[in-house]
Image (cartoon, rainbow, N blue to C red):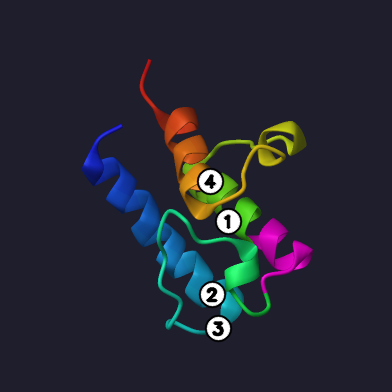
Amino acid sequence: MSAAEEQAVYARLAEIFRDVFGRADITLHPGLTAGDVVGWDSFRHVEIVLALEDHYAIRISTRELERVFTLGDLVALVLGKTASP
């Protein structure tokens, strides 16, 4: 994964977070967890995942999500699913 691709996913996530949480003051970084963001509950988590799936035309399984603990993990998952063969 290139730094540019990673930055592009974070930029998209910033837009998604603005839409889902209705605010732009959340600083996204690889170590960010749901516990760090007020209002990030299971419903909001599903909204974030669905928005990523729609934008990148990918599917993220429940099994894959069980291994996602931080925003960096989620970014890595998206990059792995969108990587060219």
Residue placed most toward the observer, 50 or 44: 44
Q: Quadrant of the C terminus?
A: top left
In front: label 2 or label 4: 4
**x, y (%) of residue 50?**
64, 53
Task: Report if residue 83 lies within the magenta region.
Answer: no
Asked whether the beta carbons under mark 1 and mark 2 sit within 8 Å of each other, the answer is yes
Is the residue 26 above or below the residue 13 in the image?
below
Give the mark, 1 or 4, whose residue is nearer the N terminus.
Answer: 1
The magenta span reads 40-47
The secondary structure type at the circle numbered 2 is helix
Q: Residues within 10 Å of mark 2 (few under 14, many from 20)?
A: some
Q: Quadrant of the N terminus?
A: top left
* Cα distance between the residues tagged 1 and 4: 13 Å
Asked whether the beta carbons under mark 2 and mark 3 sit within 8 Å of each other, the answer is yes
The kind of residue on which mark 1 rests is Ala
Q: Residues within 10 Å of mark 3 (few under 14, many from 20)?
A: few
Q: Residue at x 65, y 37 (%)?
A: 67
Give the mark, 3 or 1, whose residue is nearer the N terminus.
Answer: 3
Question: Badge 2 is on which residue?
Answer: 19
Question: Badge 3 is on which residue?
Answer: 22
The kind of residue on which mark 2 rests is Asp
**x, y (%) of residue 10?**
38, 56
Q: How many marks?
A: 4
* Cα distance between the residues tagged 2 and 3: 5 Å
The kind of residue on which mark 3 rests is Gly
